[in-house]
Image (cartoon, rainbow, N blue to C red):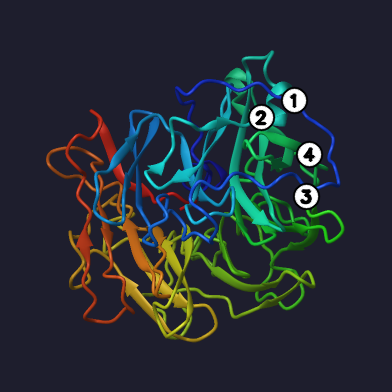
Amino acid sequence: MRAAQVILLTTAVVCGELGSIGATTTPAAAAQPAAVATPCGPGTPLASDFDGDGVSDLVVGAYRGSARVQRIQPGDGGAGTWLTDSGELRTADLNGDACADAILFAGGHEPWLKAALGTPDGLDVAGAVEVTIPQAADIASDARRSLAFEAASLRHDGISQIAIAGRHVVDLGEDGPEDYGDYVDVLTLDDSLAVSTSTVLPSVRCSDDCWDFGSALVASGRTIAVGHPSARVSKHYGAGEVLVYSADTADPTQLVLRKTLTQNSANVPGTAEEDDHFGATLALRNGRLAIGAPGESDGRLYSAGLVQPILWKESSGTYTAYRAITQDTKGVPGSREKNDQFGASLAIARGLTASGSYDILIGATEAYGRLGNAGSVTVANVTKSLYRGYTQATKGIPGNPQAGDAFFHVGVLQGGSGIDTVLIGAPGEDSLGVEDYGRAIRSDGKKLSSKTTWTGIAVPSGAPSGTTRWGFDFGMHA
């Protein structure tokens, strides 16, 4: 099962053309750094609202060959921007002003990481600052070695940080790649976005099962959660675990491991089993943590999938586990089947099923009839039995289901009124005579109902030549 899971569940590692970055590691310091500059004035931004106008900007990811590209469309309908060879993009808050910021990064033999600030004119990619990756020095002298990692941002206690989590990879030639040396780095930024302190957290326990450590990484408030879906739990290889860190009270520049969650943890439903891949996907927002286990099996229904909602109590380092959600859960549309991989992508939204609700967008790779990997999306209230389900055969959804469409990539446009917009991508859809041309759609920014209006997000004119897989992501891990 491992080889099949690598394609779907790990973060894409792309060597972009923005250049390599040198690396040094400095000791941690207890003193807080100076506040980062705030070109948009004080405030708390909506995710991806790069120009600070109170309306989230739309980010749609695609591919051009093996390189990633991103399209940023301002929420006010202004002129959009293509970012070419931009690697991964994560929306972030790097300085605590009213404009959202971004992290751009890519792994590989010459890994790089950049921080770009939002401004009243939009995301300042030209002024992006290269950020040192402490682990890069370990691979610089050996072309066989590379880094794989995810990145996320924390803004808390008046400081700005970037967390990266991943592992080293060595190319063994005919024997294939081998992963080793997991890491979690916490980079505290100064007022110029340079790294003022860098803390490499101790290796957890990565030995022969670290090939996807850090393939999922999410942050919210003072907390980060790191997925390690191949981790061995009670002798079960690939059962998976999630490591939850939060800022130290005495020195908030330091993150401390508070909890390791598995399906054997107290009050978590189910049991850790081989190849469950618990932690392969994650979503976190305001203490609501969704953990995907797309490899979860039910008897011979291998990789049917499961999602575990958790309420993370940051102040005490404790948690409450709610009911596990599968396609056999009462009220969830569809049915549990082999290779559905329910939980293959996750996002957390507000106000979709009830006033003020927290909801989980759950993507599944499932077949539609005999159309393999057509895909589906389920919206589940975090605490209540409120669900809605969508495929490309659902009335009002643009397109129609086809084999390989992969209609399961999810994202969120945060709404200032407390009701978010749902984003769904089908990057494998063939269209206009182009294989894997892709499709992206959005809801109308209202509570979901049978009357919800769904709109296609067309690939804008002027797209870089060779752009495909439109809708692969939406500026977050999906």
Q: CA distance from mark 2 to mark 3?
A: 17 Å
Q: Amino acid at mark 4?
A: Val
For label 1, the SS is loop
Of the residues under marks 1 and 4, which one precedes in the sequence? Answer: 1
Of the residues under marks 3 and 4, which one precedes in the sequence? Answer: 4
Q: CA distance from mark 1 to mark 4?
A: 11 Å
For label 4, the SS is strand
Kindly identify which residue carries mark 4.
200
Which dot, 4 or 2, sits closer to the camera? 2
Q: Which mark is residue 132?
A: 2
Of the residues under marks 2 and 1, which one precedes in the sequence? Answer: 1
Disc 2 and disc 3 in contact, CB within 8 angstroms? no
Q: Amino acid at mark 1?
A: Thr
Kindly identify which residue carries mark 1.
24
How far from the left and from the top, in percent, is residue 32?
78, 48
Residue at the spot 80% in from the left edge and 56% down from the top edge: 257
Q: CA distance from mark 2 to mark 1?
A: 7 Å
For label 3, the SS is loop
Disc 2 and disc 1 in contact, CB within 8 angstroms? yes
Q: Residues within 10 Å of mark 2 (few under 14, many from 20)?
A: many
Q: Nearer the viewer, residue 77 or 180?
A: 77
Q: Amino acid at mark 2?
A: Thr
Q: Which mark is residue 253?
A: 3
How far from the left and from the top, in percent, is residue 262?
71, 64
Q: CA distance from mark 3 to mark 4?
A: 12 Å
